[in-house]
Amino acid sequence: MDTYRAEDEDTGSQAGLTTGEVARRLGVAPTTVRSWDRRYRLGPDAHTGGKHRRWTTADVARLERMCALTATGLAPAEAARLALIGERPDTGRTRRPATAPTPDAAQGTGGGMQLGDSRQEAKGVARAALRLDAVALDELLAAAIDEHGLIAAWTEVIVPTLQAVGRKWERSGERYVEVEHFLSWHVSCALRRVAPCAIADRPGALTLLACVPGENHTLPLEVLSAALAQRDIPVRMFGGAVPVESLVAAVRRTGPAAVGLWAQSRTTASRPLAQHVAAMEWGVRGARRKPVVMALGPGWAGQTVAGLRRPTGLAEAVAAVEALVHP
């Protein structure tokens, strides 16, 4: 997949970016870029030879202003007008030349969200989420997973975007809650598309995944479930806030080789529960088995439980399960 590179800033005036590359950088569908060009004359200032149009850094900066303005709720037509003449909507006066980027663009963020040194794709995902653009968001998530793999896309693209949305929500009171829910839902849908939800059971291969009671952050477990399914490892995924009695009953009924217990915060991480599950046994006398219990998530930080595994991340958790079921 072609991605926007930092060196394109230096060569953009000569070679330029394709419409597809611009769309991925902005977090919109290519049809949206073409529509803005057709309706609002936001296309490239200069034309190069051939059929394909090329966008310079100045052209992209103008589109970034368009994205930033529409993300604030401004109507597309008005946002386009301001983007073309470099005006600020609060003053109606020209504040910068037409080629200068907006503060959001200058910071290299998606719609004003601080994304730090995360992959470039995170900025496009953030912009698509802020605009509640379902089509673009699905395309960008699928492309990131395809390009980098499930675990790397989660760690380097999706998690930084989710964290940035959370920070934006905290700074703005009750605003942007819908963005967080929207992004989480589409991430969940993307995970279901890239891996089968059900793998046939094999003796000694089943992994059971559940959030501890009171914990509802299921997305990391969904990523782990999808990654294991991609490796043909059967999984039973129980999601958020599983009651103790239900979790114990599920372990007894399935006899899993491994049990992953996710806790996002220390207030939900329960050492007695983990110890109880780790001590459970099944099978005939003389050949009884116990599950390998993995304490997953930041909530377990600083807790030591004898016999409990504590993977430092999802990649290590996948490797631990693989070693267990495919020794």
Image: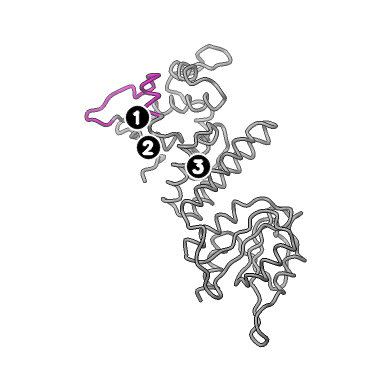
The residue singled out by tag 2 in the image is 21
Sequence order check, earlier mark of 3 and 1: 1
Q: Position of residue 201 (x, y in %)?
A: 53, 69
- The CA distance from mark 3 to mark 1 is 21 Å
| Circle 1 SS class | loop
Give above or below for 224 relative to 185: below
**Labelled pair 3, 2 in contact (Cβ < 8 Å):** no
Q: Which mark is residue 233?
A: none
Q: Which mark is residue 55?
A: 1
Sequence order check, earlier mark of 2 and 1: 2
Residue 39 drawn in magenta: yes
Which amino acid type corresponds to the residue marked 1 in the rendered image?
A: Trp
Instruction: From the viewer's side, name the closer residue of 279 and 109.
Output: 279
Query: In which quarter of the view is residue 324 placed?
Result: bottom right
Q: Which mark is residue 122?
A: 3
Give the color scheme: rainbow, by chain, secondary structure or one colour.
one colour
Sequence order check, earlier mark of 3 and 2: 2
Which amino acid type corresponds to the residue marked 3 in the rendered image?
A: Ala
Q: Is residue 17 left or right of residue 293?
A: left
**Labelled pair 2, 1 in contact (Cβ < 8 Å):** yes
Start-end of magenta stretch = 33-52
Which amino acid type corresponds to the residue marked 2 in the rendered image?
A: Glu
* Type of secondary structure dominating the magenta stretch: loop
- The CA distance from mark 2 to mark 1 is 9 Å
- The CA distance from mark 3 to mark 2 is 14 Å
